[in-house]
Image: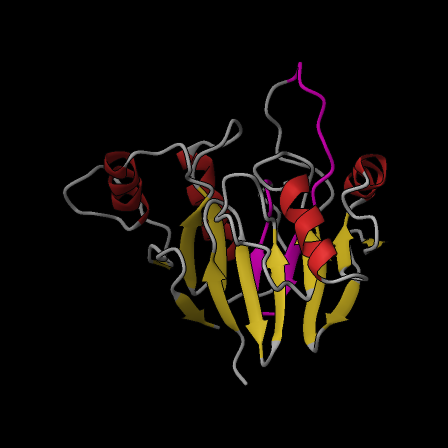
Amino acid sequence: MTIELTWAGHSCVRVQKDDFTLVIDPGFVSLANAAADADALLISHEHIDHYDVTKIAAAVAARPGLPIYTNASVAALLEQSGAASGGKVRIVGHGDNLTIGGIPVQIHGEWHAPIHRDIKPVRNVGFLIDRKFFHPGDALTDPHTHIDLLTCPLLGLYTKNGELVDWIRRLRPNRVAPVHDFGLTDLGKSGEDGFFAKDPSQLAPGTGSAYFRPAVGSPIPL
């Protein structure tokens, strides 16, 4: 069966193959049911818009033994909070190659994108799913392989449109879908879409990749 993606708000993506559901970054601004029925969780880093202990604890309670793949820092926080009590936390890092529910997953990256020199960086891992879909978390990581679909974080304390354009150009994905945009109004989203889609009515450089805005809850074939 084809792998199907569903955007669950902000930076959360549900990945489904047959009857197996893998959920990436169920943060506090993702849908309330973002992690419901998860067969495995992938968590890129510890910021609460990617890591919601309430959603994680509920997912583990619903499925004891739930596997959770994340970096060492998040694993330590999960242990301290008890949110993953009853789950199975596995620490992953750059270069790891996994198969989760029959889905190939490669780990890329080590650190969150810089925010400010006064703010200590946190660990961040990105996930390459089925060698086609790359979810970078909050980093502008280059997985050094061709990808079909890239989720691009639009609005964060670390983002700058010009840098995002250059990052997309460097990766050269077939398709780009904007995420991480909870703080944008509808007008703001429209303006960002025009910039990255190279709207001729705006001063937009374009990226060379097809750009489309996913709808929350609507499947995206991979």
Q: Position of residue 165 (x, y in %)?
A: 42, 43
Q: Position of residue 20 (x, y in %)?
A: 63, 74
Dominant secondary structure of the magenta stretch?
Answer: loop
Instruction: Depth check: give the residue in front, 22 or 194.
Output: 22
Q: Does the rendering let one see residue 130?
A: no
Residue drawn at point x = 60 percent, y = 78 percent: 19
Query: Hey, which quadrant is residue 83 in on the image?
Result: top right
Q: Magenta stretch containing residue 113, yes or no?
A: no
Residue found farthest to the front: 62
Residue 48, placed above or below residue 199: above
Query: Hey, which quadrant is residue 187 in on the image?
Result: top left
Query: Hey, which quadrant is residue 101 in on the image?
Result: bottom right
Q: Does the rendering let one see residue 176?
A: yes
Residue drawn at point x = 52 percent, y = 47 percent: 11
Q: Position of residue 114 (x, y in %)?
A: 62, 28
Residue found farthest to the bottom: 1
Residue found farthest to the top: 118
208 relative to 81 in the view: left or right: left
Instruction: Depth check: give the residue in front, 173 or 135.
Output: 135
Question: Number of numbered discs present?
Answer: 0
Quadrant position of the N terminus in the picture:
bottom right
Q: Position of residue 207 (x, y in %)?
A: 37, 51
- Chosen colour scheme: secondary structure
Residue drawn at point x = 14 percent, y = 42 percent: 201
Residue 218, placed above or below residue 12: below
| Residue stretch rendered in magenta on the structure | 117-138
106 relative to 116 in the view: left or right: right
Q: Magenta stretch containing residue 124, yes or no?
A: yes
